[in-house]
Amino acid sequence: MSRLKKTIYIFNDGQLKRKDNTLYFETEAGKKYLPVEDVGEIMAFGEVTINKKFLEFASQKEIIVHYFSHYGYYMGTFYPREHLNSGFMILKQAEHYMDQAKRMAIAQQFVSGAARNIRQVLRYYNNRVGGLTETLNIIDRFIMTLDDINDINRLMAVEGNIRDHYYKVFDKITRNPDFPFEERTRRPPRNQLNTLISFGNSLMYTIALSEIYKTHLDPRIGFLHATNFRRFTLNLDLAEIFKPIIVDRVIFSVLGKKMITINDFESAGDGIIMKERAKKIFIQELDAKLKTTIKHKRIGRPVSYRRIIRLELYKLEKHLIGEETYEPFIAGW
């Protein structure tokens, strides 16, 4: 396995440039050099400009650049030429997508992983705040139906129902009256909690995309989310498993500790956006969560959550080439 590299988050306006064999970020305040051998991805939230010379070097060093809008929405990615590109693996992905039974087998596991990790989060907080038993029972009943579903649309509908029930108890978990859930709203999110959810999910999608780049898999061919003219879908599939145990846990933590408050948001058009301070705090906590290590049953030693995401992709590769049946990671705490 290749070593995990750093993620650089840029909030200021400026220019990313190359000088000889180094990269630097230039602002009105001066230049900040980036340790190019240790950088795996750059997430740009400010007005960041780049040129061809920078992109050539980033491609050579296999650095991915994700762009986010002023509102915190994911805009797009500079995805370097695939250094591990495998025609064989692409054919295997396409084979499993085109065959309804093979596609369903993988899609069911993604939904099962998401649902079981939601259940783990609910169990964790039920032991601490209580009042979640009814929702746990409902989700258990949904999980029991997954193996009998043989249609992607029905599977997506069940996954949506599970999340609806899950979101409805966010208020019981956060116990923060300044952040009521109300209902799930997107693009734009209509309240502060929805803004946190959307921001965290967007980050999770880009992290999953970065990890896919380091494997032989093609991010354009997903299984749960339809492969169509959308640029990437496999990262959306993968993120479903990890959003509850990474993104949602970070949300509950920053709200429970009042690290982010109602004053860290502002209105923008029809929606609500996070101020820079809140984005930085959230990213700092998310980064810490990704670096947190837990005992991994499969390999018998502690690994970080970020590494677990990569291991999930290796398991999927083995499933596609017929070495072993894919089963999703389920948190054990």
Image (cartoon, rainbow, N blue to C red):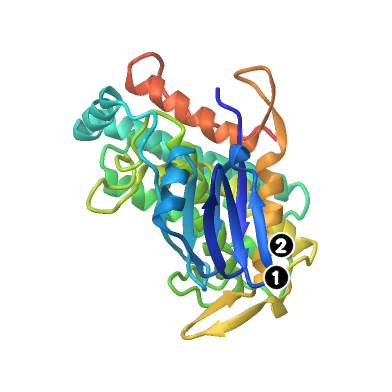
> Within 10 Å of the Cα at label 2, are there few (<14), some (14-19), or many (20+) other Cα atoms?
some
Labelled disc at residue 70: none
Left-right relation of 185 to 46 = left
- Residue 26 in sight here: yes
- Total labels: the figure holds 2
Labelled disc at residue 277: 1
Left-right relation of 62 to 261 = left
Tell me whether circle 1 and circle 2 mark residues in contact (CB < 8 Å): yes
Q: Secondary structure at mark 2?
A: helix
Q: Position of residue 82 (x, y in %)?
A: 36, 35
Q: Amino acid at mark 2?
A: Ile
> Within 10 Å of the Cα at label 1, are there few (<14), some (14-19), or many (20+) other Cα atoms?
few
- Quarter of the figure that contains the N terminus: top right
- Quarter of the figure that contains the C terminus: top right
Residue 31 location, quadrant: bottom right
> Closer to the camera, 219 or 191?
219
Q: Residue furthest left?
A: 98
Q: Amino acid at mark 1?
A: Arg
Q: CA distance from mark 1 to mark 2?
A: 6 Å
As displayed, is residue 285 above or below residue 296? below
Q: Position of residue 23 (x, y in %)?
A: 57, 49
Residue carrying label 2: 281
Residue at the spot 62% in from the left edge and 35% down from the top edge: 331
> Closer to the camera, 134 or 34?
34
As displayed, is residue 64 above or below residue 279? above
- Residue 330 in sight here: no
Q: Position of residue 45 (x, y in %)?
A: 55, 65
Q: Secondary structure at mark 1?
A: helix
Residue at the spot 56% in from the left edge and 76% down from the top edge: 273
Residue at the spot 54% in from the left edge and 35% down from the top edge: 309
Residue at the spot 39% in from the left edge and 49% down from the top edge: 158
